[in-house]
Image (tube, rainbow, N blue to C red):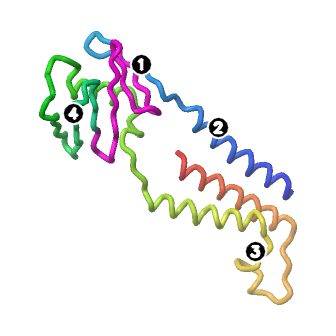
Amino acid sequence: MKKLCALLLVFTVLLTVFVHAAEDTVFTVQEGGKTFVVDTAAGTITQGGNVYTYVREGDMVTFTYPDGETYWWKTHAHGGAGGWSEGFRQGAYPDGSTLFDVLQQAVPAKTNQISIDFGNVLAAILIAAFGLWSAISPQSVWYLNHGWRFKDAEPSDAALTITRMGGVLALLLAVGILFL
C-alpha cells in the first residue's frame, strides 16, 4: 500500500510538471488585416519582420518598438490608461493599443495578469503537509483523531487505509490549488 501511495504521488507530481511544461507559448493573432505572432515565453510580438518586446508587471504592460521607443498601458478596474515615450512616431509601427489588443487575444484571460494569491499558496502548503503526514504515518494521524480517547486502542487496517487514501487526496487537492 505504501508503494502504491508513493507511486501515485510521484505520478501526480510528474503529470503536473509535464502538463504545465507543454502549454503553448506561441500564438498567431489576426488584427486589422495583419498577422501577429506572440511568443509569451520570449515576451515578443512579431509582425512583418518587426519585433516588439513587451514586459508585464502586475496590471501594467510596456511595449518596446524596434526603434527603442515605448508604449505603456495600465489596466484599471473599469478600463485603463496608456501613453508613449517622447520620440514615439505614430504611423511608423502599429500603435500600442493594437499591440495590447493582440496580446489580450493571444494570452488566455486567466493568465493575463501575473499575480500570486498567497492565501491559496499557504492553504495549499498546509493541506499538502497534512496530506503528506496522513499518507506517510496514518497511525499517528488516527491516534491524534481517535486513539487518545481510549486506553491501549489500535486502529484497524481499514482505518489506516482510509486515512492514507485521505492523505493522498489531500496532496492532490494541494497540487490542484497551486497549479489550476
Nearest to the eye among marks 4 and 3: give it. Answer: 4
Check disc 1 and report its element: helix, strand or loop.
strand
Cα gap from disc 2 to disc 3, whole angstroms: 34 Å
The answer to whether marks 3 and 1 mark residues whose Cβ atoms lie closer than 8 Å is: no
Determine which residue is flagged by label 1.
28
Q: Is residue 19 left or right of residue 119?
A: right
Q: Tell which of 136 and 53 is nearer to you.
A: 53
Q: Is residue 32 left or right of residue 171?
A: left
- Quadrant location of residue 93? top left
Determine which residue is flagged by label 4.
71
Which residue corresponds to the image point at 21% horizontal and 33% vertical from the top-left? 71
> On residue 142, which mark appears?
3
Which residue corresponds to the image point at 47% horizontal and 33% vertical from the top-left? 41
Span colored in magenta: 35-61
> On residue 137, which mark appears?
none
Check disc 4 and report its element: helix, strand or loop.
strand
Work out whether mark 1 precedes mark 4 in sequence or the reverse, and give the earlier one.
Answer: 1
